[in-house]
Amino acid sequence: MRKSRQETSETRQRIVEAASAEFRKSGISGTGLSGLMAAAGLTHGGFYRHFESKDQVLAEACDMAVDTLVAEFEEVTNVGGFNAAIGHYLSTDHRDALEKSCPYAALGSELVRSNEQVKEIATQGLERVIELLATQAGPGTAESGRARALIAMCTMMGALTLSRMAMDPALSSEILQTASHHLIQPGLPEA
């Protein structure tokens, strides 16, 4: 029996959602199509009915992961501003949930080696994150808000990556806390 267009669309969406989580959890090179499809509850053979290549699903999964990150930042900044975004990003919950976390910290070194389409999607998403943080960065000029957002994103991504790498739980927490402390604006409520 042939699937309806809606069922096909829903299946494709399920594959992209699974890919988004699997790539962040296991990395791009560590995620095979069989494992990706199994995570979506499907067989490997169905992949090519929906995608031409792993790069194509990677592009869509990256886009979805960035959309999720932006939505999370929008939600926390609406409640607590810039400092809340810092606190959310540099939390142990975010550190420990690889499959739900920032695609830049989870995949940054692999995104560098991706095709042009994936890099373009990642770059556009990064611009959205920076813009959102810049609007929340506090008083000053647009240039100083953007600079603060860039510094924050670079610091947060590096701190999250290093905290995940550290085998010593105390060091891992210290990295997150120190980075957060140095990014939180003095005089503003902490996250």
Image (cartoon, rainbow, N blue to C red):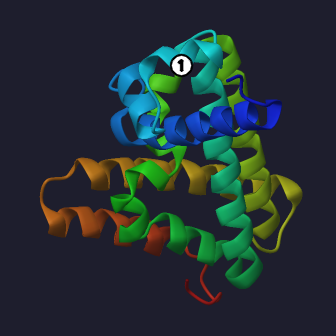
Which quarter of the figure has residue 35?
A: top left
| Horizontal arrangement in the rendering, residue 170 relative to residue 31 (left or right) | left
Who is closer to the viewer here, 154 or 72? Answer: 72
| Residue 61 x %, y % | 60, 34
**Would you place residue 123 above or below residue 141 in this image?**
above
- Quadrant (top left/top right/bottom left/bottom right) for the N terminus: top right
The three-letter code of the residue at mark 1 reads: Gly
| Residue 19 x %, y % | 51, 35
Who is closer to the viewer here, 62 or 112? Answer: 62
Q: Mark 1 points at which residue?
A: 46
Of all residues, the one furthest to the front in this rendering is: 1
Residue at (16, 65) in percent of width and height:
169
| Residue 150 x %, y % | 65, 49
Residue at (82, 64) in percent of width and height:
135
| Residue 77 visible in the displayed image | yes
**Would you place residue 179 above or below residue 125 in this image?**
below
Of all residues, the one furthest to the left in this rendering is: 168
Residue at (63, 15) in percent of width and height:
49
- Quadrant (top left/top right/bottom left/bottom right) for the C terminus: bottom right
Who is closer to the viewer here, 94 or 80? Answer: 94
| Horizontal arrangement in the rendering, residue 159 relative to residue 84 (left or right) | left
Q: How crowded is mark 1: few (under 14 residues within 10 Å), some or many (20 or more)?
A: few
